[in-house]
Amino acid sequence: MSDQVSDHLVEALNVTKAFGANVVLNGVDLTVDPGEVVCLLGPSGSGKTTFLRLINQMETLTGGRIWVGGELVGIVERKGRLHVRKDSDIARQRSRIGMVFQRFNLFPHKTALENITEAPTQVKRMPKAAARKAALDLLDRVGLADRARYYPAQLSGGQQQRVAIARALAMQPELMLFDEPTSALDPELVGEVLAVMRDLAAEGTTMIVVTHEMGFAREVADRVVFMDGGVVVEEGTPEQVLLQPTEDRTKQFLRRVKQQADAEAAHDAELSQVLES
């Protein structure tokens, strides 16, 4: 199976990943079309993050195949035999994909502007003046035009994550991967990051988002995929999966998420009463 012509930007076929005896992904099939937003939901340990890391070649496949933009990820077929791609070729493939992590992973000794210009100038050899202009435009796009000269330690968690999104966008990727981008944030900062992601979706950015933010998934996703135990349990539109799930495991998960949200809302209400009294 070599590179192929496909309408899908991402195509995963029978993807498996094991760490020793621990099988994390067990035969995952998934496609993502250009301009589509796909949200991956599921409990911790269900394989969601590992799947993103395989797409971005931060992990290597145990079995199966992944194509991005019609190219086999990590391997290439020559004369009927599969070969591991050279490091330079893997770097080229990876440059087409932007990834935003739970932790912001910014360089602490570089300003917001310098964090964003690093990859375009070093990897794409973009002239510094052009990279700087593009970075300033991106900072404006994520609402941080006035924070260009700030260091990460001078920024809130939400601001750092928005810089991380701008940094990923600086490479002009065909695909954006988000791995729980709001999970490390204080609750009041979550909204500002989700707002940037909503804007990206509205602009037609192809996105795969691992998230526990059900409201975001319901509002923004074209398709929701529920994973558990390393397999895709259920997928469909947000209405189908979140409001009318057919699988018992999906129903159990959503019920637990609702119970947790209700408990947090009750706690917030109690706290408000204490503060107002």
Image: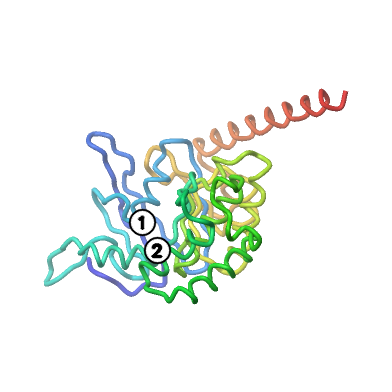
Q: Position of residue 68 (x, y in %)?
A: 36, 65
Disc 1 marks a residue whose amino acid type is Ile
Left or right of 164 on screen, residue 61: left
**Quarter in which the N terminus is drawn:** bottom left
**Quarter in which the C terminus is drawn:** top right
Left or right of 80 on screen, residue 31: right
| Residue picked out by circle 1 | 55
Q: Position of residue 150 (x, y in %)?
A: 58, 54
Instruction: Pick the residue in front: 118 or 138.
Output: 118
Q: Where is residue 124 in the image (x, y as percent from the top left)?
A: 37, 72
Task: Specify few, some or many for label 1: CA neighbours under 10 Å numbering under 14, 14-19, or 20 or more.
Answer: many
Task: Specify few, some or many for label 2: CA neighbours under 10 Å numbering under 14, 14-19, or 20 or more.
Answer: many
Q: What element carries label 2?
A: strand
Instruction: Pick the residue in front: 194 or 227.
Output: 194
| Residue picked out by circle 2 | 10
| Residue 239 seen in the figure | no
